[in-house]
Image (tube, rainbow, N blue to C red):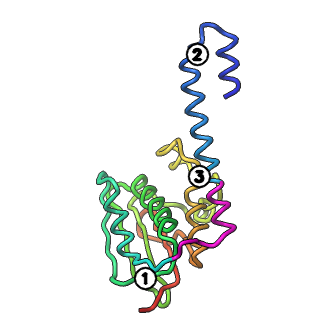
Amino acid sequence: MRASVEEALLYPDVDARETLHEVLQAAERFQTIINEMLMLTKVRTSSPHDVELIDVGALIREEVARRSRDIPIHVRADDEVTVRGNAVQLTEVLTNLLVNAQRHAHSRVEVTVGRDEALALVTVCDDGEGISPGDRDRVFQPFVRLSESRERDPGGSGLGLPISRAIVQAHFGTLRIEDSPRGACFVIRLPLIRS
């Protein structure tokens, strides 16, 4: 940003207005990254506030209804899969997983909500190229972006998945990438509230 401004000041033939536009875009990108880093730090160092009982299936259906229809999202959700947590934070996780799944899918995204013994089980799977086993933990590290992700979304920060995992862990759960016949399959497990 500094070099762009200095260049505009030194050389009269440089379009100062275009330079200001580029600097503003860079500043907005930095602001987004800083906000995401602050969120990651906050989630890692505090417990969820505004905790309530959440019907995970209903939360998924609401979030899917907000998504674009370019790549269809198919939902299968059991009734009364209830967890205790912060709805805003868990919606952030679901939004990030759905955005990523639609970005990498070829033709469809499958979301399931069910139970696995004492845990709520949520899977978000796409039919894209998938993530190799060697990269499955790496993508949860801050700023890590695989080459396909950089090609499909050059403006991403590499903080969405680390923030999502931190939120799930703050809710005493896990977020992993597991084997699937095709594409990537993200699996969330959260403590289930028994009715």
- Give the percent coordinates (x, y) of residue 175: 55, 71
Taking depth in this image into account, of 177 and 21 the one nearest to the observer is 21
Alpha carbon of mark 2 to alpha carbon of mark 1: how far?
Answer: 56 Å
Res 128 label: none
**Which comes before the other along the chain, label 3 or label 2?**
2
Q: In terms of secondary structure, where does tag 2 sit?
A: helix
Q: Quadrant of the N terminus?
A: top right
Residue at label 1?
82
The residue that mark 3 highlights is 158
Magenta region? 38-51
Looking at the figure, which quarter contains the C terminus? bottom left
The quadrant in which residue 107 appears is bottom left
Of pointers 2 and 1, the one earlier in the residue sequence? 2
Q: Which mark is residue 16?
A: 2
Tell us which disc is closer to us: 1 or 3. 1
Q: Kindly identify the residue that appears in the image at 43 percent across and 77 percent down.
A: 54
Residue beneath the point at 58% across and 64% down: 136
Q: Residue 106 or 31: which is nearer the viewer? A: 31
Q: Position of residue 32 (x, y in %)?
A: 58, 46
